[in-house]
Amino acid sequence: MQRWLVAGLPLLFGAPSPAQEVETGALAPAVHVDEWLLHGPVELAAGARPKLLVLAAYDDLDDLREHADHLHLLQLRLHDRGLQVVALLGNAPAPLAIDPQWSFAIGRVDGMVAEPLLQLSDGSGTVLWCGRPEHGLLTAAATALDGKLDPAVCARDAESRQNLCSGLDDLPAADLQPQIAQLLLHNPQDGIAWALQYLVQTRRLGDVAAARQTLAAAGRELAAAPAALGAFADLALRADRHDRQTVQALLPVLTQTAPAAGGDSRLQLAVLRALVRGGHRQEIKRRAERLRAAFDHRPEQLLQLAEILADEHGGKDWAVVAGTALARAEQLQADPRSVVAVRYRLLRNCSGDAAAAARLLASHTAELGGDTGVNNDAWYLMTELPTMGRFDDLAIALCDQLLLHRDRLEAFELDTCALGRWLAGDTAAAVELEATAATRDGSRGSYEERLQVYRSALARGR
């Protein structure tokens, strides 16, 4: 485990100038649109606005494209009931860059600085809900039009979701489940909540039967909500790289749903991950080349593309595409730490250059500056939602570095190494390391909890 808990950052909705935090249940900040670019003007003043206004702010058109298919779908489904979607852009797009087939309105607002967080507000201007499409936007909008959306409940759910995401591997599992159940009760199309439930069942409780039920239920519930399905599938597929049943369960619904949201990179990358894990060679080639071209100016997506293609079971087949994606991401100044992790994965699984991989590992380990730094980096890579399941190769190697001098490791470092061994498929070693950690520090119930997960997995032959 880590020495500290990394707190989640607050989600802000960009207001004209400066950025303001939107409070659910309060009046929405006034917005002045400098230029209407599509399907405008729309009346935004309180008292004259539509019955339900969905307002979304983006720095530029590339950010908007991530959500455009979802906003288009929402506008088509609920326009007749009084809903209007308005997307605000901080930077004017190039001429003809906006798709005229989009059904929602688009306006330009000078000086916009925005995190892509949407708000739903009623005709009076009261903010009812804030979130992202994967948080159950479709359900929230339909419930609001029915007059049944409680802003206070929505605010509590948003805070709960954020806390769960930042502390999933540190909070007691018994405390996590009721909170997740409440999220799904209030919004059954919350893809993040479904993913959290699945992660608790697989990684915290080792409850395989419950996890299989969650996979099936989430697939049914989210099939009509592409953003939520993409968020769920992304995390579920990264939970355990040795689990083929998850791929088999998700691939059919992913391939059926993905065409409706071609601009959603998370959904498209989740499809690719499932195809790679399932060994669908012909389809992998077609999709990988298309995504490489589509992501040419997007460093984070390029890194994810390279990471997915550098799979341990077929990385050599896609080495060229993965290598060019990584090189382009580095040109675009992608996060240096993520670049190191992806490069290590490519060296191990694509080029097979063990010597170069060892040199990169030694350099990275030296930069981390001692056991605690190495431990924390490995723990973060294995457990934090943005990196979980993406950089296990590097994290496992870091754990193996710690185990070279096992006698001096503290309980929390043994706990980290146990997780590394479990992710590597060496469940017997994970049991032994976790048992030692629990013996050395019996005050931490999380050690005993993980020990039970590993023992159950060992008994199943995992």
Image (tube, rainbow, N blue to C red):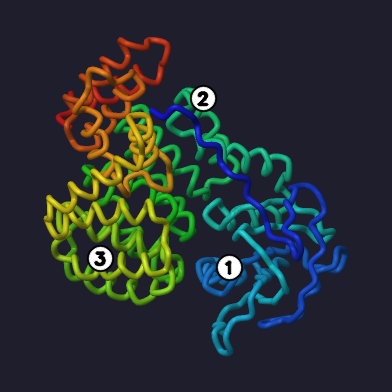
Residue type at numbered disc 3: Ala
- The percent coordinates of residue 309 (x first, y second) are 24, 61
Q: Nearer the viewer, residue 282 or 326?
A: 326
In this rendering, the count of numbered labels is 3
Give the residue number, with chain letter if any, for mark 3: 322
Residue type at mark 2 is Asp
- 354 vs 276, nearest the viewer: 354
**Residue indicated by mark 2:** 175
Residue 371 occupies quadrant: top left
Q: Which residue is mark 1?
A: 71
Distance between mark 3 and mark 2 Cα atoms: 40 Å
Determine crowd level at label 1: few under 14, some 14-19, many 20+ residues with C-alpha closer than 10 A. Answer: many
Pointer 3 or 2: first along the chain: 2
Dot 1 falls on a residue whose secondary structure is helix
Contact check, label 3 and label 1, Cβ < 8 Å: no
Check whether the beta carbons of the residues at disc 2 and disc 1 lie within 8 A of each other: no
> Around disc 2, counting alpha carbons within 10 Å, would you say few (fewer than 14), some (14 to 19), or many (20 or more)?
few
Residue at x-position 68% and y-position 63%? 54
Q: Nearer the viewer, mark 3 or mark 1?
A: 3
Q: Can you say which quadrant of the picture contains the C terminus?
A: top left
Q: Real-space Cα distance between discs 2 and 1?
A: 34 Å
Determine whether the residue tagged by mark 3 lies in a helix, strand or loop.
helix
Q: Amino acid at mark 1?
A: Leu
- Give the x, y percent position of residue 295: 39, 71
Q: Is residue 302 left or right of residue 311?
A: right
Task: Give the farthest residue toward the right.
Answer: 47
